Amino acid sequence: ACAPGPEAPAACAPAPMVAARWCLVVAAAAPALLAVIVPEIWIQRAVWRNRPKKGTQAAWPSRYVLNNVSNLPCPSFITSERVEQLANGSFEHRSSDIWIVTYPKCGTTWTQAIVGSLLGFEIAGLSEADQRVYCPWPERALGGARLSIAELNERPAPRCLKSHWTMSDHLSMPERGKVIFVMRNAADVAQSYFHHYLDLHRLFDFDGDWGDFFGLFEAGDLGSGNYFRYVASWWPQRNASNVLFLRYEEMRQDPASHVQRIAEFIGVGRLSEGRLEEVLEATSFARMRKVEEGQMRLKRLFGIRRDVRVRQGKSFEGQRMLSPAQRSILEEQFNQTLRPLGVPRKWALGLD
């Protein structure tokens, strides 16, 4: 019973008082609720902006999210329509273009920064939004970091352009310009690519461990397909006059001489000692990691990203993660695909 007096139960409080108490409860809980809801909305929005509308793009047959573009597995933000536009004349190829071509996790970001710096850009950030200023990714058709074909065509020469494409479609065209191809050994690529999948687990819907990922790497069931077949598509081009074929391991060992080689190849000419030091400082791993760490704080807090893309960048560390069976698989794929082409074993495998 709700008898009047100071001992009356809370349920007997007047309606305005009950409402006020509920408002206080909700207000107290709101920050915690928003801390969960807002990041999740942000993540979902970012993920869906990077995926094609249902029914507009063929999917790669995988339990993870990939598109099938010209029979090549691709991240969801690369579409058949965009690759067709790059090859059918909609995109204006120029002889002055500088394509940085790599299998994923072969020093792409670093090489983009080097070329961007040589072309006079300030490397203020390493996100794709930053990179689209100095070296965009033409195959990217979706997401906040995309550029339209018209925007790509409006870019002044020389254009630095990034690609993970095989030597086919638009990159097989004779008017494509110059290509800087960077090769890295399979063991280190697999290790770095695994961390990339963990970092962008929401985009790829990847929730596996190293064993799960290695199965994808073996089958070529990930962006850019099988590593060995990818390298095989570019290896015959290594001595072409418009191709500079580099090894990531040698770049890390002697960055100064490789920056000079790149500068001369793209037409900048030989650098003075002072200018060389500027480029080396702007593109050092220590500086790039510091820059990216600063950009990552909010994304880490909200769970959008787990790690920076510029990690340690060391060479010949990947073999430590391989089981004997996994080493044998890499050896077998090398023997079948790259050894007949004359690719050195150490270059391709990174194994002792």
Image: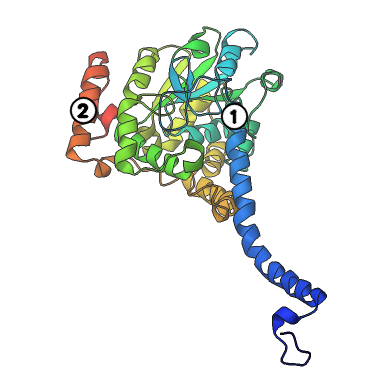
Query: Residue at 59% of width from left, 29% of height from top?
Result: 135
Query: Where 67 sits versus 237, above or below?
Result: below
Check disc 1 and report its element: helix, strand or loop.
loop
Q: Work out whether residue 144 or residue 112 is closer to the camera in this orientation and state it.
A: 144
Q: Quadrant of the C terminus?
A: top left
Q: Residue furthest toward the front?
A: 1
Query: Residue at 65% of width from left, 67% of height from top?
Result: 29
Label 1 sits on residue? 135
Query: Residue at 67% of width from left, 23% of height from top?
Result: 148
Type of amino acid at the residue the image marks with label 2: Glu
Query: Residue at 69% of width from left, 71% of height from top?
Result: 25
Label 2 sits on residue? 331
* One can see residue 95 in this view: no
Q: Position of residue 104 (x, y in %)?
A: 43, 31
Please say if the residues under marks 1 and 2 sit with CB atoms less than 8 Å apart. Answer: no
Type of amino acid at the residue the image marks with label 1: Cys
Q: Position of residue 341 (x, y in %)?
A: 27, 14
Q: Residue furthest toward the bottom?
A: 6
Q: Work out whether residue 217 or residue 99 is closer to the camera in this orientation and state it.
A: 217
Q: Which mark is residue 15?
A: none
Q: Nearer the viewer, mark 1 or mark 2?
A: 2
Left or right of residue 63: residue 219: left
Q: Position of residue 79 (x, y in %)?
A: 55, 21
Q: Position of residue 307 (x, y in %)?
A: 48, 48
| Neighbours of disc 1 within 10 Å: few (<14), some (14-19), many (20+) | many
Q: Work out whether residue 48 or residue 271 is closer to the camera in this orientation and state it.
A: 48
Q: Quadrant of the N terminus?
A: bottom right
